[in-house]
Amino acid sequence: TEAATVEPPAAEPTPANQAGDSLGGAQETDPQSPQSEGDTFSSAQNPDDTSLIAFATTRDGEENGEIYVMDTDGENLHNLTNHPADDFQPFWSPDGNALVFVSKRDDNNEIYTMAADGTNVRRLTHHPEADVLPAWSSDGSMIAFTSKRDGNWEIYRMDADGTNLLRLTNDAGEDLSPAWSPDGSRLLFHSDRAGNDDIYMMNSDGSQLIQLTNDPADDIAPAWSPDGRQIAFASVRDG
């Protein structure tokens, strides 16, 4: 898997919430699983204090993912969650004072927030199906995430306190890994709705869907540049 970049095109959008032509192949990784090869399986740098990194790890046991924070030099390591259930996929709030994350502490993958020191844990979602891959908007007001609550993986958003839930995608394919634009107006995600995983962009209300990549190989995990002019993503298109 390699990284690549594209520029968001000025293309004529297609309507959002429109079913794709085919289901395509299965997602390469299970978004519900915190497990990955190696010690650290997800990480995020504090946007307000770039000397801090939060990450999830199984260093306390293969069946127990925890969220840690450390300095960028690897010093001052602290376990923030310290819970027997899996905690993973940390994402900083834009002011660096809190983290949103996924936990199985209530027997199902749900989305929680906590203060940057691990206190004030709050459960935001309450559904028997999995809610995963949370991402905080740049102004801190909303959180986008992926859920299987309507039968397959779709993108949703909610206010940062868990209220005002809105479904943004509605397709037979799998829509995963939402990423907010720096100005909060758009979201990237990857989807197999056209037969294999490609990168898509839509407005933050789910409208004006645009397919950005179209390659036989899978393109996944998109991320915006800080100025919103470029998009990085992972791809197996080069072997």
Image (cartoon, rainbow, N blue to C red):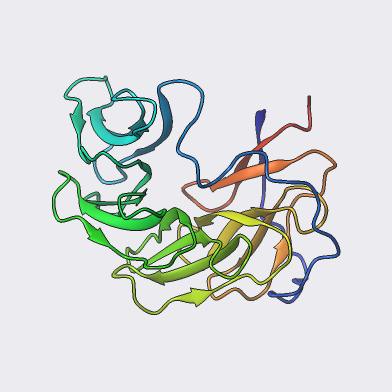
Q: Is residue 67 above or below residue 168?
A: above
Q: Nearer the viewer, residue 212 or 125?
A: 125
Q: Nearer the viewer, residue 114 or 50?
A: 114
Left or right: where 130 falls relative to 190: left
Q: How many marks?
A: 0
Q: Is residue 77 above or below residue 134?
A: above
Q: Position of residue 104 (x, y in %)?
A: 36, 49
Q: Nearer the viewer, residue 40 or 227?
A: 40
Locate the N terminus and report the quarter of the image it occupies: top right
Q: Position of residue 225 (x, y in %)?
A: 52, 46
Locate the C terminus and report the quarter of the image it occupies: top right
Q: Is residue 28 above or below residue 147?
A: above
Kindly tell me whether residue 51 is visible in this rendering. no
x 46%, y 62%: residue: 144
- Return the residue found at the far front: 107
Q: Is residue 74 above or below residue 196?
A: above
- Quadrant of res 53: top left
x 26%, y 33%: residue: 68
Q: Position of residue 50 (x, y in %)?
A: 28, 36
- Return the residue found at the far bottom: 164
Q: Nearer the viewer, residue 140 or 82?
A: 82
Q: Position of residue 89 (x, y in %)?
A: 40, 44
Kindly tell me whether residue 180 is visible in this rendering. yes
Left or right: where 148 falls relative to 83: right
